[in-house]
Amino acid sequence: MVGYNTGHLSSGVIEVVCGPMFSGKTEELIRRVRRSQIARQKTQIFKPSIDDRYHKTNVVSHSSLSIEAMPVKRSMDILGHLYDSTRVVAIDEVQFFDEFIIPVIRKLARRGIRVICAGLDQDFKGHSFGPMPELLCMADRVDKIQAICTVCGAAASKTYRKNLEESEAQILVGESDLYEARCSAHWDSHEQDQDLLAFTLSLESKAKVEEATHKEGQL
């Protein structure tokens, strides 16, 4: 199954589709894959095995578009299941993969393969998600798409997690039962950041007052 055509010298391309949940990332990945299939290019799709929300094996979008894929536990498993004739590799929910996904994607591109990745660039706290920062830096093309805020209907670039008391783990697979798309104005973590900033400024002000009081006491 594994085997590379070392005579194939053309350079591959790395494409990344990112954004919050419910923005259509998987739908865009499926669209690009189907266009490649129409062009009769050998294509393989991979997804992390922990993502079984809609289907054990297929990649399924929130709008119910579906395409056959291969679930894998580790990044290196992608290379183990790769056919020599493959010219396009699509990887959904790429943020869930381990750190070895970066060298795997680089290796695929060096072999002349077009690599299409879709994933969350930020977690529910607004922090970078897994391997995404390095992947975005090395990509030849990045498309950051937006969802619609469930509160006001504006463009949404954040993922909001409901019921934080249940879990604050970065990886918690779920759908609309756990997550919503939000704009920055209606994203709770934004308010938490503002509270932290206010608290920090308050501490700095308090320290300055104490320092001034101490100096007065020495005069």
Image (tube, rainbow, N blue to C red):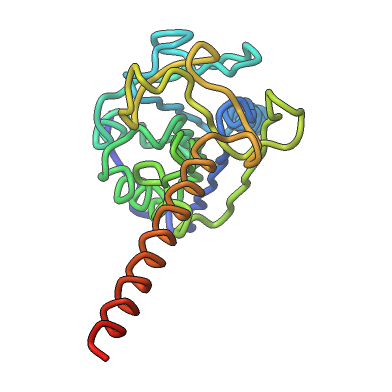
Q: Residue at x 66, y 36 (%)?
A: 156
Q: Is residue 191 left or right of residue 110?
A: right
Screen quadrant of the C terminus: bottom left
Asked if 182 appears above or below 127 in the picture, the reply is above
Percent position of residue 185, x then y: 65, 40
The quadrant in which residue 206 appears is bottom left
Asked if 184 appears above or below 56 in the picture, the reply is below
Choose between 71 and 208: the one closer to the eye.
208
Q: Is residue 22 left or right of residue 54?
A: right
Choose between 90 and 173: the one closer to the eye.
173
Q: Residue at x 51, y 49 (%)?
A: 194
Percent position of residue 113, x then y: 46, 46
Choose between 14 and 63: the one closer to the eye.
63
Residue at the extreme bottom:
219
Q: Residue at x 32, y 21 (%)?
A: 167
- Count the marks: 0
Q: Residue at x 47, y 13 (%)?
A: 58
Choose between 59 and 88: the one closer to the eye.
59
Residue at the extreme top:
55
Percent position of residue 133, x then y: 42, 53
Screen quadrant of the N terminus: top left
Percent position of residue 190, x then y: 53, 43
